[in-house]
Amino acid sequence: MADQSTPEARTTAVPEPREGTTARADREGISRRRLLGTAGATGVVLGAAGGTVGYAAAAPAASAEVTPLTSVGEDRAMFHGKHQPGITDGLPARGHLIAFDLAPGAGRKEAAALLRRWSDTARRLMAGEPSANGDTGVAQDAGPSSLTLTFGFGHSFFARTGLEKQRPVALDPLPDFSSDHLDKARSNGDLWVQIGAHDALVAFHALRAVQKDAGSAARVRWQMNGFNRSPGATARPMTARNLMGQIDGTRNPKPSESDFDQRIFVPANSDPAWMAHGSYVVVRRIRMLLDDWEKLAVKEQEAVVGRRKSDGAPLSGGTETTEMDLEKTDSAGNPVVPVNAHARITRPDQNGGAAMLRRPLSYHDGMDADGVPDAGLLFVCWQADPLRGFVPVQRKLDRGDALTPFLRHEASGLFAVPGGAAEGGYVGQLLLEG
């Protein structure tokens, strides 16, 4: 969770479209609003006769003009490109994070075949087409719904495939942090898949396809499911709110910034070469202790974060996007933005310029045995080098962030996400065939 250097995903309304993103052409059909609006006029009848309930609906007049349905379901992200999809795309309304371990006996050959299958499936599903491997038909009535699939490799993958010499230094295990309470069974993994879409069935359809494609080559290590606000749920595009009710992600890096690629993506002349145009993703399951948080008055919550809850503006004044004044004091001479406020600690200028692109999901997995909500944030952040992005910021948070007592880091993973697949190719091809 952070202001910018734990940058939150930008807005539910799509930050700045990823290069290559297009909208699908409208398909023929009756619009939902038109159908509902004509229900009364054409006589949708529910009646009870002799204990039975019948439905009768008059068809629209033949002369009535039919308006194509336009919705977020028509929006499409592109699979092929310089970078993989699902990095700079906007927050998905529904998402799944899955880690796999290669099966015993599976190695480089099996991994390459699996990445070919996954890439083909991703290309098909992101275009709104059925998968080639026994499609379930779950999403056959829907459009692409901005579906994205993203693939990465964990530290352990390279030993399993005999590719240790190709393992990047940036993929070295993350250090231990004092706030960690990590479940090893829900951390790391050989392979990682991120799925995001604006429709829950489309996202689930992709999840099942990926799981089926794994076949005997890999088995699921862990899976996490999350959500964000649906596009169009607010009167205007807004930065997302987390489950604490705070606007979260005001200072997320923007693709329009001159140093965006330098901060988020691995350069073309990278070492190893197969990571060119790729990125590194840190995934953290962060449980929010909501019962404790909600006992605080709004003023106390704002002091912890350093921003107003109502509109995300810094406590030093202005609007959400106003630069925070860290020197401003109150009448007693105390900093208006407390020295341990989360927004102060995570600012890039307080961390040597460290920055990450956040694209998280909220989650709620019910109640635990004590009746406490198992809810929080699936923290997903992207950077060109985690040792310069995530690590220094998390170390500083560990030393005195006012928000830390209300959070519990329960799972963690770091994955190398190569650049996008070329037409006719697959993700990770340069690594697996180089």
Image (tube, rainbow, N blue to C red):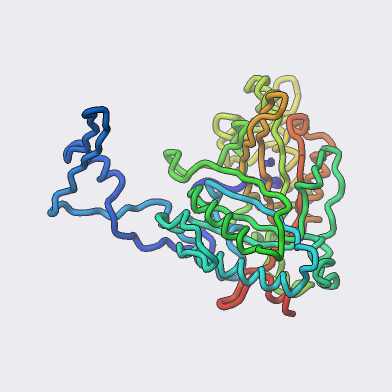
Front-most of 72 and 371? 371
Residue 24, x across and y down, in percent: 40, 62
Kindly identify the residue that appears in the image at 59 percent across and 40 percent down. Answer: 322
Residue shown at 74%/34% (left/top)?
407
Q: In the rendered image, which quarter is residue 89 located in?
A: bottom right
Q: Is residue 256 visible?
A: no
Locate residue 334: give its quadrant.
top right
Task: Report whether residue 200 is seen.
Answer: yes
Q: Determine whether, in the image, residue 25 is placed left or right of residue 78.
A: left
Q: Residue at x 68, y 66 (%)?
A: 278
Q: Relative to 312, does residue 372 appear above or below in the rendering? A: above
Left or right: 309, with 32 as reference point: right
Q: Position of residue 141 (x, y in %)?
A: 40, 55
Residue 258 pos. (x, y %): 62, 61
Question: Residue at 69% of width from left, 33% of height from top?
Answer: 288
Q: Nearer the viewer, residue 92 or 426?
A: 426
Residue 264 in the image: state x and y as whole percent. Answer: 68, 59
**Is 191 left, or right, of 366 in this rendering?**
right
Q: Which quarter of the picture shows residue 108? A: bottom right
Q: Is residue 290 above or below residue 286?
A: above
